[in-house]
Image (spheres, helix red, strand yellow):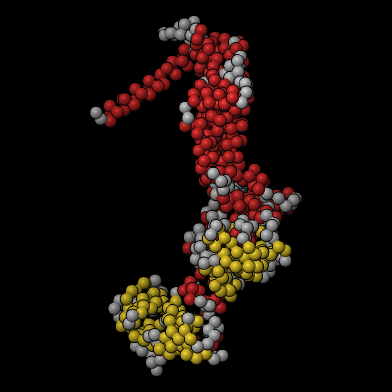
């Protein structure tokens, strides 16, 4: 097993810069997710680690060794693609055995390791079939088996779940995480799906426009976003432009429209240095709509329901308070508020996060 | 005018095109010395005469060797050219493609004369190698068109997967790309062979003295007399140029079926 290190990596295609001076360290055995919208440079970064693209500048170090000049077939990496990329002219067993054939593994051992890998992905019976005879989810498991059977130093996953149906995707994500934890391989996972990233990763690297926006554990990235981009990209958020009136170690006092003065715990404002322009991030799940104002009346504001997006156990509302529109995702018992209802938005200050403005 | 008229017209067009061919095949089994109806009996005597005709057999061997070499060289060059044009960023890609495809756009006579004049200018005489070169130039576009179309549909990530698993680029080509390309390679080779096998225009210009291919042999035999042997030879030609591609397609289909592709 090994670590991966990127030192000031830059990738340009002509005049377009896909990845700008990026550095990161991926520890031995970690599951790290590169998360971002399409075109943010996450796939380019993965392809540079894989050796499918050469960085314009900077170094890639795997296991303490600079690999910039090592061609892909000598890097000993496992690669899984969005579209499975199984060899259609080979049986499942031949697909899984492919990498072992180039590693001077004795025949009997190949057979055994292929069977072990197929059992690991819970498809021990399909060795003699051709990929086309399998479902999408099964094909992706075979692709995973093919990548891990070679005992790669690093497992690289390029949106491996995107081509699957929603239900299957959630099952596969649990299974994929379990398999990764079991074999303990260092894994780099690329996705644009925030829930996959939050569910699976030890660490998330949020990227935008070729830059790293934030690196951290899933809870840290979710609870204390470092930028407005991260706050908007992970989950549904309401972001209010305001000012920081005072900042101490324990708390930050912000003055924002609609809610007025809000005191945010210091732990939820790690990126806010001091007084000046600031932003308040309110998760849509934490903005509660009520019939009546709460006791004490703090942090509450009247609003009108504009749109109701009913989702069974929860509802997504768009409400208006003056000039501003808010999004609220609330669990409900019976029926949602109707369009036009007058409600009170309430929130607990400890559920908010503060950002520099 | 209605659908009935259009249908009748279509049938007539096909009859006009294929009846002469059918007559040739039918008469090749005629017992009679003169190729005319009604047939007096069925016999294989003209095929036998063909077998014993040294000039025809020599032409046949020449055509076969020429066709096979043309197919081999054209397919190899075609696959390499397609790989370069589809998989790599070659400068002047469009120009190169146009030049490679041009031989099917230029009238064959023009191509034939041009190549001959060019080699004359270089001081190179007619030879079997020249004939072969001419056939390769003429068949290459067909191979490239077929192979390129297939190569575009082979996903790049399948090759990348092979590379990531430890296969070198050359190993990747032989273990993944070529097998997936095989239907197109086979089709291209068959095209090249059949086009070479029944080409006459270019061959008449390029062939050295004393060398005859089957089509030029038929042509020269026709100048002397219309022997029923020619019907037999025509039948053999039809079987080879029509039957071979059909057989090839059937084989490719059955392989594809087995893999569920």
Q: Residue furthest top?
A: B33
Q: Residue furthest front?
A: B121
Q: Which quarter of the figure is the N terminus of chain A placed in?
A: bottom right
Identified at 60% across, 55% down, the residue is A143
Q: Is residue B153 visible?
A: yes
Q: Residue furthest bottom?
A: A296
- A6 w.r.t. A288: above or below: above
- Total numbered labels placed on residues in the image: 0
- B124 w.r.t. A106: above or below: above
Residue closer to the observer: B167 or B200? B200
Question: Quadrant of the rendered structure where residue B1 is?
Answer: top left
Q: Is residue A159 visible?
A: no
Identified at 54% across, 9% down, the residue is B45
Where's residue A178, x and y in %? 61, 67
Where's residue A247, x and y in %? 52, 90
Where's residue A351, x and y in %? 48, 84
Where's residue B135, x and y in %? 56, 27
Q: Residue furthest left?
A: B1
Q: Judge left or right: residue A23 versus residue B230.
A: right
Identified at 52% across, 54% down, the residue is A135
Residue closer to the observer: B163 or A90? B163
- A61 w.r.t. A248: above or below: above
Q: Judge left or right: residue B113 versus residue A238.
A: right
């Amino acid at each position: 097993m090994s670590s991966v290190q990127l030192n000031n990596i830059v990738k340009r295609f002509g005049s377009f810069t896909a990845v700008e001076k990026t550095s990161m360290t991926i520890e031995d055995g970690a599951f790290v997710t590169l998360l971002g919208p399409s075109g943010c440079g996450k796939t380019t970064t993965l392809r540079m680690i894989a050796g499918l693209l050469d960085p314009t500048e900077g170094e890639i170090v795997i296991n303490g060794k600079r690999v910039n000049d090592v061609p892909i077939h000598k890097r000993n990496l496992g690669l899984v693609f969005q579209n499975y990329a199984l060899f259609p002219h080979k049986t499942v067993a031949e697909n899984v055995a492919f990498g072992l054939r180039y590693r001077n593994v004795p025949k009997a051992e190949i057979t055994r390791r292929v069977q072990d890998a197929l059992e690991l992905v819970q498809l021990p019976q399909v060795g003699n079939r051709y990929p086309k005879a399998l479902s999408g989810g099964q094909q992706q498991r075979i692709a995973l088996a093919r990548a891990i059977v070679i005992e790669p130093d690093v497992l690289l996953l390029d949106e491996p779940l995107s081509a699957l149906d929603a239900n299957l995707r959630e099952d596969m994500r649990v299974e994929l995480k379990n398999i990764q934890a079991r074999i303990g391989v260092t894994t780099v996972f690329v996705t644009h799906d925030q829930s996959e990233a939050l569910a699976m990763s030890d660490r998330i690297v949020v990227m935008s426009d070729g830059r790293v926006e934030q690196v951290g554990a899933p809870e840290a990235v979710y609870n204390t976003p470092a930028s407005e981009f991260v706050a908007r990209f992970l989950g549904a958020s309401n972001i209010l432009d305001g000012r920081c009136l005072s900042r101490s170690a324990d708390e930050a006092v912000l003055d924002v429209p609609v809610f007025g003065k809000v005191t945010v715990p210091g732990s939820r404002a790690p990126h806010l240095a001091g007084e000046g322009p600031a932003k308040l991030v309110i998760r849509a799940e934490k903005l509660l709509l009520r019939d009546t104002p709460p006791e004490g009346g703090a942090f509450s504001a009247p609003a009108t329901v504009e749109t109701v997006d009913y989702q069974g156990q929860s509802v997504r509302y768009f409400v208006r308070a003056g000039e501003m529109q808010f999004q609220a995702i609330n669990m409900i018992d019976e029926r949602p508020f109707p369009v036009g209802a007058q409600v009170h938005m309430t929130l607990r200050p400890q559920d908010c996060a503060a950002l520099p403005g | 005018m209605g659908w009935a008229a259009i249908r009748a017209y279509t049938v007539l067009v096909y009859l006009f095109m294929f009846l002469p061919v059918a007559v040739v095949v039918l008469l090749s089994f005629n017992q009679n010395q003169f190729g005319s109806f009604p047939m007096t009996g069925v016999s294989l005597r003209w095929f036998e005469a063909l077998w014993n005709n040294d000039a025809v057999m020599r032409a046949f061997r020449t055509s076969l060797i020429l066709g096979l070499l043309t197919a081999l060289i054209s397919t190899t060059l075609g696959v390499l050219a397609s790989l370069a044009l589809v998989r790599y960023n070659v400068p002047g890609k469009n120009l190169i493609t146009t030049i490679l495809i041009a031989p099917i756009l230029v009238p064959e006579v023009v191509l034939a004369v041009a190549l001959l004049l060019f080699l004359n200018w270089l001081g190179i005489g007619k030879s079997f190698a020249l004939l072969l070169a001419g056939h390769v130039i003429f068949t290459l576009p067909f191979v490239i068109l077929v192979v390129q179309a297939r190569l575009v549909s082979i996903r790049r990530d399948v090759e990348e997967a092979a590379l990531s698993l430890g296969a070198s680029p050359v190993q990747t080509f032989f273990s993944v790309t070529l097998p997936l390309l095989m239907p197109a390679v086979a089709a291209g080779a068959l095209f090249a062979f059949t086009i070479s096998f029944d080409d006459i225009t270019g061959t008449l210009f390029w062939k050295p003295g004393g060398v005859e291919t089957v089509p030029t042999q038929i042509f020269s035999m026709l100048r002397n007399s219309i022997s029923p042997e020619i019907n037999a030879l025509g039948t053999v030609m039809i079987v080879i140029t029509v039957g071979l591609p059909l057989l090839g397609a059937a084989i490719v289909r059955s392989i594809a079926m087995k893999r569920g592709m």
